[in-house]
Amino acid sequence: TQLLEQSPQFLSIQEGENLTVYCNSSSVFSSLQWYRQEPGEGPVLLVTVVTGGEVKKLKRLTFQFGDARKDSSLHITAAQPGDTGLYLCAGGLSTASKLTFGTGTRLQVTL
Amino acid sequence: NAGVTQTPKFRVLKTGQSMTLLCAQDMNHEYMYWYRQDPGMGLRLIHYSVGEGTTAKGEVPDGYNVSRLKKQNFLLGLESAAPSQTSVYFCASSTTFSGGIYGYTFGSGTRLTVV
């Protein structure tokens, strides 16, 4: 069974600060996705990374897939209150028909 | 594009009642899923389907049944609701690529309370 551990579990920061969320596993994944979930809504896909060492940027968000494809990080620059939410990573295998979800990181950004 | 639509959005059931949650997607995705999300438990997979007419059990299938008679629809049934089934239910669909599943598109959820 593949497990994805996210850290930290909770993060409360002020607007303008930078932060990094980590997603770690002992298993190798063929793809890694990041989602953001706002209260009362379903998770929304932010990015999919598929190559070891790959870096993708989405405005102030930077996503990296580890070289060994066992871990990933999400870095947010100059956080804003609109970044508040639950961040989930999810790993996929080329032979699997479902994703393995991480434990989640709840981020709160205050003014 | 509506994406994934779940109905109803809210429901209150009495213990022992039955109900069906409907999920519809308009993206021609092959794969569809039902998850439940509870505080501190994360997303847990109930059942999933890799194509019309096929279904498979996830990690918490007991007390639920599913059907995928049409590619665009995935129904989740509760035969005899129990308070332990109070949760937020999410449907998702996905497409694939050579490396596996590209990513899920989730519905906005159904908040179910069983009293």
Image (cartoon, rainbow, N blue to C red):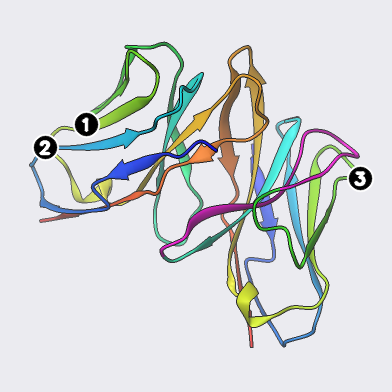
Can residue B67 be seen from the camera position used here? yes
Report the amino acid beneath label 1.
His
Assess disc 2: are there few (<14), some (14-19) or many (≥20) residues with their C-alpha within 10 Å of its C-alpha. some
Q: Do labels 2 and 1 share a chain?
A: yes
Q: Sequence-wise, which precedes: disc 2 or disc 1? A: 2
Badge 2 amino acid: Asn
Q: Where residue A10 sits: x, y (%)?
A: 24, 55
- In magenta stretch: residue B52: yes
Is residue B2 among the parts visible in the rendering?
no
- Residue range corresponding to the magenta coloring: B40-57
Which residue carries the number 2 mark?
Answer: A18
Question: At numbered mark 3, what does the secondary structure look like: helix, strand or loop?
Answer: loop
What amino acid does circle 3 point to? Leu
- Give SS at disc 2: loop
* Residue at 8 percent of width and 41 percent of height: A17
Q: Are marks 2 and 1 in contact (CB under 8 Å)?
A: yes
Question: Marks 2 and 3: same chain?
Answer: no
**CA–CA distance between discs 2 and 3?**
48 Å
* Residue at (20% x, 51% y) in the render: A81
**Residue highlighted by disc 3:** B69
Identify the disc placed on residue A75: 1
Specify the subunit that label 1 lies on. A
